Image: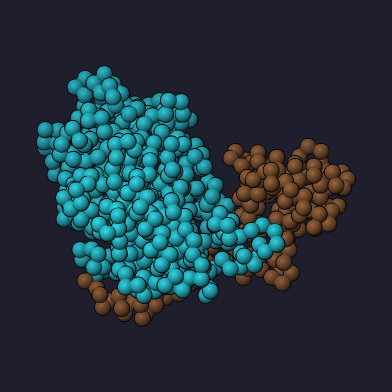
């Protein structure tokens, strides 16, 4: 049964919803955001967002209600196409909703080790190893030095 | 016998082990407890700023080291012409001092902060940074190539970042986000540059102390401060000389909070100019997407190259004065996604990954730092309701972007896109006015020789209170079109030297 009052903590709903926002991409080995279990991280961030948090919760509730109106199992029970129809219908009336979702979902997603590895980024803190960067282009530098004061 | 110096700092000592780049979720930490905006950060040592009447949000950091903890360390000096815009352009006012007066203090400061750069920039009088320049990396190379193809001025940035081991600091290892503090300690911040030296010389530092007001004697001279200690207990500290270094918002706030029968409009405010003439640097941000991988999050984010191609007035451009470009790198994976979302380039749902892949590691760009001219209607006042956690009235910023600035920003966006296209960008976009960009807070207690038109004299002493000195950006007369920290610090050294030289007749 879906959590009747709080869509942020309705795990099945959040997994289905977040997989709509960032779906899996097999070709790029990118996981879906819902499949990574990011619901709790997003919920925690939304609950402390005084600017956009209310818009996100209101939008989520509208998505869940619209989904349940189509199928008692709610969003997880719908086909992908039906889920998208529900979400797009809600977005027409909640313009700030997706901005708020992305504001919290994108950082959670793009700092997840599996995502970083799929991007070819090292899944580690920058410090202490740091990074190498490319040297200054010697040809450019030669031109510059010719103009040196 | 030396001078007894005590510094009251409202923030704590910071520790490099706590900085975001020690952690996998460094991007989230940079947007939270290490955000530049005190209204976002909301740490105990922060005070709120009402910025609802400003298109630019003021940014700052409250700790030992202040905003140098979070700055980019891009370290240009002002040019000689920046000190005399009234003479050359007929606007604002000339400074009462010039580049030559500050030059030895710029040089001392470069050594103290540890500056990497390349001598010989034709935009400046000759000076030699103590360290070799930082490598440009792929992003710096590509932005420089665009400037070069158009025949524009460009030069590797002077950067207050160690390109080699320097004075106990380890060389930069390209962690990336300098603006969320440097875990390596390669970036200069005054907690690791000036403070260890000052403490060895006997300067005392009390942290967690928030000054409520400056107190005065019957004759109107300053005699100390009232401050809240870290337990919230009001304390009194007497002093023969009071020196303020609270930034262009904190300083007028404190002066306006220091009303007395002798100074009913706030301390040092007989001119009525305390809190007026607030200058930011309105910023435009221009970015390009390139086909080649740039690894843009690696390396100091704001320290590649600068260009002064549009720095001086040219009547054909339709605005007075000008701006500099500062090359910028990319960002971490999460920030790239947020940039892409804000620019409408990374959608949710189908197409998300394809769109993101175009951006990830393929972004380079620049910011334009436009010279903001002083206007008395741009102000810092006391908010009638908002206070800090000690109940001290908080500042309110009222700021309108001038028509001159709007024209300058529009020009900078178009020419910046041109440069990125010349460099090979397949797509460009811009934010023509960056809202979270009030890093530079200037002009609210301006320097001058006319007591009716300025707050402090030509060496930082308040006209009205001869034992009160101001050494931060609030004493700037004009803003130039470059980052101000090098000049703020050179001014602070110059004023300290003037105090020392004039100690025998300091209050005459």
The x, y position of residue A90, in whole percent, is 72, 46
The residue closer to the viewer here, B506 or B168, is: B506
Residue at 14% x, 33% y: name it: B507
The C terminus of chain B - image quarter: top left
The residue closer to the viewer here, B374 or B328, is: B374
In the image, taking residue B96 as reference, residue B226 lies left or right, namely right
**Rendered image quadrant of residue B26:** bottom right
The x, y position of residue B43, in whole percent, is 50, 39
In the image, taking residue B302 as reference, residue B111 lies left or right, namely left
Residue at 69% x, 47% y: name it: A91
Relative to B206, is A84 above or below? Answer: below
- Camera sees residue B82: yes
The residue closer to the viewer here, A134 or B408, is: B408
Residue at 72% x, 51% y: name it: A88
The N terminus of chain B - image quarter: top left
Residue at 37% x, 58% y: name it: B411
Rendering colour mode: by chain
Relative to B136, is B84 above or below? Answer: above
- Camera sees residue B61: no
**Rendered image quadrant of residue B277:** top left
- Which color is chain A depicted in? brown
The x, y position of residue A149, in whole percent, is 21, 71
Q: Which chain is cyan?
A: B
In the image, taking residue A133 as reference, residue B322 lies left or right, namely left
How many labels sit on residues?
Answer: 0
């Amino acid at each position: 049964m879906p959590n009747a009052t709080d869509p942020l903590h309705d795990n099945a709903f959040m997994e289905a919803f977040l997989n709509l926002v960032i779906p899996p991409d097999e070709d790029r080995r990118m996981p879906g955001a819902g499949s990574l279990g990011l619901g709790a991280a997003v919920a925690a961030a939304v609950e402390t967002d005084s600017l956009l948090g209310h818009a996100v919760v209101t939008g989520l509730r509208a998505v869940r209600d619209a989904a349940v109106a189509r199928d008692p199992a709610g969003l997880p029970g719908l086909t992908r196409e039906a889920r998208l129809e529900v979400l797009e219908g809600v977005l027409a009336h909640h313009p700030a909703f997706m901005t708020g979702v992305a504001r919290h979902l994108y950082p959670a997603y793009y700092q997840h080790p599996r995502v970083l590895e799929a991007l070819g980024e090292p899944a580690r803190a920058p410090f202490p190893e740091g990074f190498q960067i490319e040297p200054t282009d010697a040809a450019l530098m030669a031109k510059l030095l010719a103009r040196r004061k | 016998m030396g001078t007894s110096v005590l510094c009251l700092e409202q923030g704590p000592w910071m520790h490099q082990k706590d900085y975001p780049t020690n952690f996998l979720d460094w991007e989230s930490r940079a947007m939270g407890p290490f955000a530049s905006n005190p209204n976002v950060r909301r740490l105990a040592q922060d005070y709120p700023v009402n910025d609802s009447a400003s298109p630019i949000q003021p940014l700052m950091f409250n700790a030992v080291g202040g905003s140098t903890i979070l700055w980019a360390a891009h370290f240009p000096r002002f040019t000689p012409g920046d000190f005399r815009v009234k003479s050359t352009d007929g606007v604002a006012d000339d400074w009462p001092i010039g580049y030559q007066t500050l030059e030895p203090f710029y040089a001392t400061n470069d050594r103290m902060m540890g500056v990497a750069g390349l001598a010989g920039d034709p935009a400046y009088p000759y000076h030699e940074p103590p360290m070799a320049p930082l490598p440009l990396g792929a992003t710096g190379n590509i932005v420089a190539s665009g400037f070069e193809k158009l025949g524009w001025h460009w030069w590797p940035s002077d950067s207050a970042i160690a390109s080699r081991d320097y004075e106990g600091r380890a060389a930069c290892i390209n962690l990336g986000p300098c603006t969320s503090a440097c875990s390596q300690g390669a970036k200069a911040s005054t907690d690791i540059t000036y403070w260890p030296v000052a403490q060895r010389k006997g300067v005392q530092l009390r942290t967690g102390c928030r000054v409520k007001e400056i107190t005065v004697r019957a004759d109107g001279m300053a005699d100390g401060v009232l401050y809240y200690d870290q337990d919230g207990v009001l304390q009194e500290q007497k002093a023969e000389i009071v020196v303020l270094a609270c930034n262009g918002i904190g300083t007028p706030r404190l002066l306006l909070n220091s009303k007395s029968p002798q100074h009913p409009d706030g301390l040092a405010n007989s001119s009525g100019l305390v809190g007026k003439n607030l200058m930011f640097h309105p910023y435009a941000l221009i970015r390009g997407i390139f086909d080649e991988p740039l690894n843009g999050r690696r390396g100091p984010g704001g320290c590649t190259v600068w260009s002064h191609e549009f720095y001086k007035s040219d009547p054909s451009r339709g605005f007075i004065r000008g701006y500099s470009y500062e090359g910028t790198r990319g960002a971490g994976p999460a920030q790239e996604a947020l940039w892409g979302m804000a620019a409408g380039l990374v959608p949710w749902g189908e197409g998300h990954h394809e769109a993101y892949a175009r951006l990830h590691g393929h972004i380079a760009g620049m910011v334009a730092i436009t010279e903001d001219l002083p206007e008395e209607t741009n102000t810092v006042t006391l908010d009638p309701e908002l206070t800090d956690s000690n109940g001290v009235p908080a500042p309110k910023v009222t700021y309108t972007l001038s028509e001159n600035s709007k024209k300058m920003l529009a020009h900078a966006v178009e020419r910046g896109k041109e440069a990125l296209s010349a460099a090979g960008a397949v797509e460009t976009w811009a934010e023509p006015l960056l809202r979270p960009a009030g890093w530079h807070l200037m002009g609210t207690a301006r320097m001058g020789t006319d007591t009716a038109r300025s707050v402090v004299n030509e060496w930082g002493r308040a006209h009205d209170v001869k034992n009160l000195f101001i050494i931060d950006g609030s004493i700037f007369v004009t803003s130039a079109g470059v980052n101000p920290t090098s000049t703020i610090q050179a001014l602070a050294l110059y004023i300290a030297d003037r105090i020392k030289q004039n100690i025998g007749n300091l209050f005459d």
